[in-house]
Amino acid sequence: MHAVIQYHASKNGQLLFHSIYLLIALFSFRFFIVFAIHSFATALEQALLPKELVPFIAPLYTSFYHPTTLDIIDTIFTFIVLAIIVLGSFGRKRKQLQNELEAFLRLKRDAKRMEKNVHRQSSYIRLLEIVSKIKKMLIESSTEKEIFTHVCNSLGTFPHYKVVWIGLQSEENNIVNIAYKADMATPSYLQKNFQIKLDDDDPHAYGPVGECMRTGRSVLIEDTQSDPRFEPWKYRAKASSIHSVLSIPIKTFHQKKLFGVISIYGDAEHSFSYEEIDILEDLAQNVSSAIAYHKADNHRKETEDELKNSSQLLQNIIATVPVRIFWKDKYLYYRGCNALFLQDADLSRIEDIVGKKDTDLVWAEHADAFIQDDLQVMKTKNPIVNRVERQGDMYVLVNKAPLFDNEHNIIGMIGSYTDITLQRKAELYLKENEQRFRELIQSLPNISIQGYDKDRKVIYWNRQSEILYGYSEEDALGRKFEELIIPEAMRDRVIADIENWIHNNKPIPASELTLRKKDGSDVLVYSSHVLLRSQEKEPEIFCIDIDLTQQKEAELALERLANHDLLTQLPNRHFFLRHAKALINKAERNHSEFALLFLDLDDFKVINDTYGHDYGDNVLIEAAERLRSSLRDYDFVARYGGDEFIVTIEYEGDIELIMTIAQKIIDTLKEPIYIKNTSLQIGSSVGISLYPQDSSELLTLLKYADAAMYSAKEGGKNRFSHYSNRSL
C-alpha cells in the first residue's frame, strides 16, 4: 500500500511540474509578443522603419498595445493554459487507469498461476512424504506381502489417487491378477473378477498393464476417455471419475521377465507429470531392490544357520582340547567352558556354571586373586601368555586374554590353563593331538596357513598354500615370507607391522590383501594372523589366508547381471537409463548435442513364430554384434527389451553424420543371417530424436524416438525417421 501511495505521489508531482513549466512557457511567449510590438512602436516613433511599412504597422500597434487588448490576450492565454492542463491531466489519468487495470489483470493471472504452482508443489511434497515413508518401511519390512500391502495402502492416501493395485503374473497361465490393492473410487473400480489377459487376441492385453508387461517400460494413459488403449474400461473409468492411469514395471535383478506391475489411477482432475512419474519409477526401483534385499537376507539367514552349526562344531572341538578353557563376560560371570574345566569345578553340566562367579565355585577361597587378575587383563587389554602358577600341589600354565566385539569394545575375557604336573604324559598327549591338528590343517579346503619365526622365515607351509601361491613346501621353508608373496610396495609396511607386534604387542588386524603368486600374478585374500609365544621358544607368527578370487568374481558377475542383457551381452535398459542421464548432464555442462536412435527389428516375430525362439535368440545375438560393428568405439548401444535397441551418438551439429550411421545400421541389419544352414531375412526401422533440439528431457526424447520409429515402420520399414521431420 505504501508503494502505491508513493507511486501516485510521484505521478502527481510530475503532472504539477509539467503544468508549471507549460504556464511559464506560455506567459514567456506572451511577453515576447508584447516586447515585439513595443519594439515596433519604438522603431515607428524614431522613424527607423521604412516609410512604406508605416501604414501597415501603425494600426497594429494601436490595436495590440492598447491595455484592453493586452488583457484580452492574457485572458486567452490563461484559458489556453488551463485547457491544456485539464486535457493533459484527463489524458494522463485515463492512461494511468488503463495501465493500472492492465497491471491488475496481469497480477490476477500471476496469482492464479502461482496458486496453481503452489498447489502442484504441495502435491509433490505430499507425494514425496508418502514415498519417503514407504522407503523407510521397505527397510523395516520382512516379507514381500508386507512390502506390497504397505505400498498400495500408502499411495492410496495421496489425494488424487483413486485406485492403486499391484498385479502379479500367474505362473500357470498368461494372466495378470490383482495381488494387492487400495480402491478408493466411488463406485468401486476393481471388481472381484478383475484381471488382465496377455493373449495377443484379447483386447485387454493392449491396455497399460499389458503394454507394461510386454515392453518392461512405464505406460501412461493421459485421458481414459480418448486413449484407444483404454477402450475396454473407459465407461467404468468414467463412472468412477478416473481420468489418467500410470502402470510401472516391478523387476528383480535375477529375473529376465517382470515381477509385476504397479498401476495407479488418477481422479478427474489429475494428470501425471514427468516429475511425478520419475518419483514413482524410483519408488518401483526401490521396491525391486527391497525384494532382492529380502531374498538376499533369507540367504544370509541360511548362512547364519550354517555358521551356527560351525560354531557348534567349534564348541565340540573346544570341549575335546586337553586344556581347561573358560570365558566370562565383562562382569566376570561365567558364560561357558569346556568339559575339563567343568570337571575341575566339580560340576556336571555347562548350565550349572553359566551365570556364576568364582566366589560360587569350589575355589572360592582363591576367588579374590582370580578376580583381580581378570580385571587387570580387561583393564590393560594385555593378555597373559604362558604364565606358570602353583595352585596347591599342582602347577598350571595360565593364558588369559580380553574379548572384543566388532568395534573393539571389551565384552569379557577368555582364559585357559594346563596342568603341567604330569608333564611327560601331557607332552605325549599333546604330540598326538598336534599330529591330528596338523593333518586337519593340511586337509582344510581353501584355507592357506603359513608359519614364520621372529626373523620372518617360513617354518610352516600347508598344502593349500602350495596351491594358492604356487610355491611347494620345499621352496618356501627357510625363506623370508616377504620375498615369496608380499609385493615390493607393501614390504616395508608389513615388516614394520610384524616387528611392532613382536616387540610392542600391537596385533595386526585381519583385512583383505592383494598378495603375489610365484608366477607374478596377484591374488586377493582375507588374511588374519596369530602370534604364539612360549618360554622355551622364540615368538612364532601364523598367517591364515582365505582366497577371495571366486567371491570377487561372483560379485562382478552379479554386477554385470544387473546391468547387462544375458542374451546379447549388451547393456540393458537399467544401464541405458543411467548412461542417458549422465549423457544429458554432460551435454548441459558442455553445451553439446547427441542423437537418440530407437531401433526395432522388422519381421522378427515372423522368425520366432516360424522357426522358434532358438532361432530368434540367435538373430538377436547377430543383430547385437552387427550393431556394435556399425558404430564408433565411443557410441553407445543397449538392448531396450524384446527386439528393441537404443543407440546414443554424440555429434557436433552435423546431422548428416546421424543419417549416415542410421543408414549404415539399416544396411547392415538387412543382410541375410545364416543359422543352421537357414538364411533368414530381417530389417530394421529406426526413429531419431535429437538433444536438445527436440527436447532436453529423457522421457520425451524416448517418446519422440519411439514415435519416429513407428512412423518409419509405417512408411515401409528398412528406413529411418526423425520425429520433427518424418522423412529425414
Image (cartoon, grey):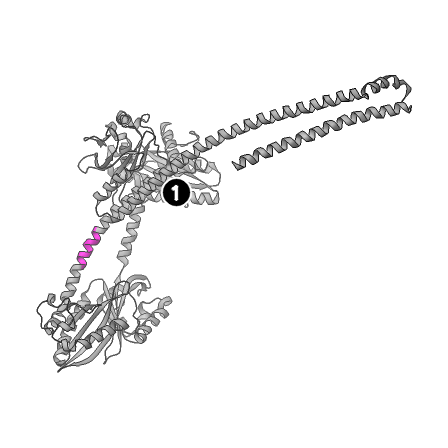
Does residue 675 lie above or below 480 as drawn?
above
Report the front residue among 436 and 417.
Answer: 417
x, y percent for residue 628: 37, 43
x, y percent for residue 29: 75, 27
Mark 1, residue position: 580
Left or right of residue 439: residue 100: right
Left or right of residue 660: residue 310: left
Residue 639 seen from this side? no
Does residue 180 lie above or below 226 as drawn?
below
x, y percent for residue 122: 37, 38
Q: What is the three-letter code of the residue carrying label 1? A: Ala
**Magenta residue span:** 298-307
Which quadrant of the figure contains the C terminus?
A: top left
- Residue 456 appears in which quarter of the rendering? bottom left
Check if residue 301 falls in the magenta segment. yes
Report the front residue among 188 and 2.
Answer: 2
- Residue 462 appears in which quarter of the rendering? bottom left
The residue that appears at 85% across and 19% down in the rendered structure is 57
x, y percent for residue 250: 27, 40
Check if residue 141 falls in the magenta segment. no
Q: Main secondary structure of the magenta part?
A: helix
The residue that appears at 21% across and 68% down in the rendered structure is 331
Q: Residues within 10 Å of mark 1 (few under 14, many from 20)?
A: some
